Image (cartoon, rainbow, N blue to C red):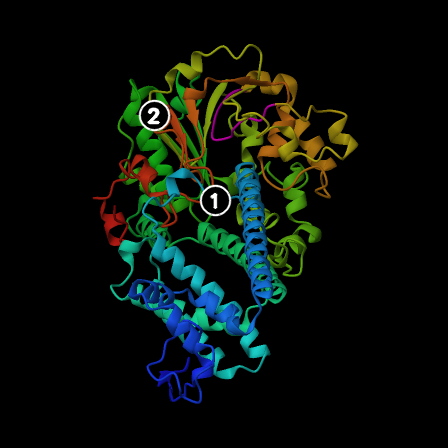
């Protein structure tokens, strides 16, 4: 009696001729007993030899079922042939392993040179994310699932329905057992038993279905299908990350609504403006912040004032849009920065900023650009991936993003101003920047090029002669986010006019994609003074492997990237640098459920 692969009990009659030559029967005169068995019984009287013969390997029994019927010469040839087959098999296995090792080494080398920033994301294959607790059982079960799927497909093709059902059943059980586990310690107690059960069914499937060329074709098909799925998931992931990064969370939507309502209901809109003397005093330290995010702007102001040695000498010029003007103004009226002066303005009040003067505003009103943003079948749609998707970011439609090129027009009385993005945190006194000698340059900024990264050829289209004839592709890029601008030198060199000229040349967007950094690199080409790297550390919004010491010693840290500190997407270990400057005990924040 025995059990077949599908659990059914079977009976089988065993005859003498079915037995191997190592068997010795008590009754040698049985009609099923081969004639030669008497000789065998006489020649194996010794118990020791008999036990040794009874333990002969199953492989020999299967390969040589009729040994006694063969002549010694044929028997010897058969054994030699089998030895050659075994040697050849071992050699092929060794060569196959060497080929696999070479492929793995090549893949590792390619992964080292992979540029994860192309997709606007950080790489998940850093050492920080290596799981040192991964163990053999989990890897075995994952391999078994792959093998089971391959054999199941072959079984289905061969109409082996029972075997197909068994393989798929075991595969589902193994998948449930593995779940989200990342090490053996996270597997359920019965996982090893499931691995053994899967191994049993795979062994039977191998005996019945294994064929090297068929398996090779099946694995190639599975690999191609998996790569296609991975690429599709990458595109979806890029889209969802962009969506999550640019969608305003409910608490951040609540905050400006609450502030705007109180601004009008409580009569704050009737209050008179403060004296303008400090706003135009060049002996003070002036900051420009252009933002529609009340919470983020408050962190920039709070962190700057907290580290300022003389807060009363610092003046903040905040410009926002019409939608957030009341909320921004209300926040700083009820939460004024200690000792510092702050002025909130509405960009819609700048009557000089119109389409007849501003190239970007004229382009934003064009039908071509509206089609670029709002037609789903445009080349930047999800179907073609994330390379162009990020350029459909709504911030590129906002003039707040381009107002940085009009600083002398916004602040005609000032000589120097420090521009700050709303996704930065100040950790040191910034006063020394105003006494810095820019050596005739207009812009003081931290350079971002490391080896070949973040140079001009990363941002500009050097296949266009307008770019290649005027700029060096290896010129070092620099960062927006903390920039000291000499406005007197700006006016002398007509920087805004240079900006307008290049924007007009790029109306068809063939020189660079949308955004403010590429035109900034062009406009301030050979007019940027490199600041010490300690002034400005970037990458907290996309790179989880930054040097912690550099972050802590930096004067300004910048959350550039999608993972802003006020979002759930934020990189957790960097969030505390930002959140410690948020006034979580503020009634407005508590009412909107903005918690630490």
Q: Which mark is residue 575?
A: none
Q: Nearer the viewer, residue 29 or 521?
A: 29
- State which mark lies toward you, 2 or 1: 2
The picture places residue 152, in percent across and down from the top left corner, at 51, 73
User: What residue would you read off at disc 1?
Assistant: 321
Decide which of tag 2 and tag 1 comes sooner along the chain. Answer: 1
Q: Label 1: few (<14), some or many (≥20) within 10 Å?
A: many
Residue 172 seen from this side: no
Which corner quadrant of the image does residue 496 belong to?
top right
Q: Label 2: few (<14), some or many (≥20) within 10 Å?
A: few
Is residue 533 one of those drawn in magenta?
no
Q: Nearer the viewer, residue 103 or 446?
A: 103
Q: Is residue 534 above or below residue 119?
A: above
* The magenta segment: 476-486
Q: Which mark is residue 549?
A: 2
The picture places residue 167, in percent across and down from the top left corner, at 45, 74
The picture places residue 173, in percent across and down from the top left corner, at 36, 71
Q: Secondary structure at mark 2?
A: helix
**Farthest-out residue, left:** 585
**Farthest-out residue, right:** 465
- The quarter of the rendered structure image containing the N terminus is bottom left
Q: Nearer the viewer, residue 226 or 161?
A: 161
Residue 503 seen from this side: yes
Q: Nearer the viewer, residue 152 or 16?
A: 16
Q: Is residue 266 above or below residue 27?
A: above
Is residue 479 one of those drawn in magenta?
yes
- The quarter of the rendered structure image containing the C terminus is top left
């Amino acid at each position: 009696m025995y059990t077949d692969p599908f659990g059914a009990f079977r009976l089988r009659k065993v005859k003498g001729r079915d037995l191997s030559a190592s068997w010795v029967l008590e009754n040698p005169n049985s009609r099923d007993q081969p004639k030669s068995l008497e000789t065998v019984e006489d020649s194996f009287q010794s118990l020791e030899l008999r036990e040794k013969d009874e333990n002969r390997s199953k492989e020999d029994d299967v390969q040589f079922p009729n040994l006694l019927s063969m002549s010694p010469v044929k028997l010897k040839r058969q054994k030699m042939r089998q030895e050659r087959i075994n040697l050849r098999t071992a050699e092929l296995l060794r060569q196959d392993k060497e080929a696999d090792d070479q492929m793995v080494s090549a893949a590792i080398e390619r992964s080292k040179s992979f540029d994860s920033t192309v997709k606007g994301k950080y790489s998940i294959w850093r050492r920080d994310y290596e799981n040192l607790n991964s163990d053999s059982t989990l890897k075995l079960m994952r391999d078994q699932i792959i093998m089971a799927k391959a054999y199941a497909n072959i079984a289905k093709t061969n109409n082996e329905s029972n075997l197909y059902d068994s393989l798929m059943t075991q595969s589902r059980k193994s998948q449930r057992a593995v779940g989200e586990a990342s090490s053996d310690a996270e597997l359920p107690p019965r996982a090893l038993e499931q691995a053994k059960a899967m191994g049993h069914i795979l062994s039977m499937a191998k005996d019945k279905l294994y064929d090297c060329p068929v398996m090779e074709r099946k694995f190639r098909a599975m690999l191609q299908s998996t790569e296609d799925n991975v690429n599709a998931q990458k595109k979806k992931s890029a889209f969802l990350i962009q969506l999550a990064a640019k969608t305003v969370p409910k608490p951040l939507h609540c905050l400006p609504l609450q502030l705007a309502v109180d601004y009008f209901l409580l009569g704050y809109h009737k209050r008179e403006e403060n004296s303008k003397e400090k706003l135009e005093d060049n002996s003070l330290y002036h900051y420009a912040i252009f933002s529609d995010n009340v919470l983020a702007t408050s962190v920039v102001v709070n962190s700057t004032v907290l580290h300022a040695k003389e807060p009363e000498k610092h003046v903040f010029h905040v410009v926002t849009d019409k939608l957030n003007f009341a909320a921004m103004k209300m926040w700083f009226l009820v939460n004024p920065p200690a000792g510092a002066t702050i002025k909130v303005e509405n960009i819609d009040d700048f009557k000089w900023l119109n389409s007849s003067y501003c190239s970007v505003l004229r382009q934003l009103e064009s039908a071509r650009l509206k089609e670029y943003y709002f037609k789903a079948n445009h080349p930047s749609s999800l179907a073609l991936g994330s390379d162009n998707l990020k350029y459909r970011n709504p911030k590129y439609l906002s003039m707040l993003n381009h107002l940085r090129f009009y600083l002398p027009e916004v602040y005609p009385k000032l000589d120097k101003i420090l521009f700050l993005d709303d996704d930065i945190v100040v950790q040191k006194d910034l006063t020394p920047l105003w006494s810095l000698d820019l050596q005739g340059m207009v812009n003081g900024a931290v350079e971002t090029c490391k080896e070949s990264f973040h140079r001009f050829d990363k941002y500009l289209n050097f296949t266009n002669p307008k770019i290649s004839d005027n700029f060096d592709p290896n010129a070092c890029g620099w960062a927006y986010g903390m920039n000291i601008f000499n406005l007197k030198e700006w006016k002398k060199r007509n920087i805004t006019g240079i900006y307008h000229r290049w924007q007009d040349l790029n109306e068809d967007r063939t020189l660079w994609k949308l955004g403010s950094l590429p035109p900034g690199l062009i406009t301030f080409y050979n007019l940027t003074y490199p600041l010490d790297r300690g002034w400005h550390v970037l990458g907290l919004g996309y790179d989880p492997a930054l040097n912690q010491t550099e972050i802590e010693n930096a004067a300004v840290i910048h959350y550039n990237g999608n993972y802003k500190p006020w979002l759930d997407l934020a990189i957790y270990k960097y969030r505390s640098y930002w959140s410690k400057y948020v006034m979580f005990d503020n009634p407005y924040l508590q009412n909107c459920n903005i918690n630490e």
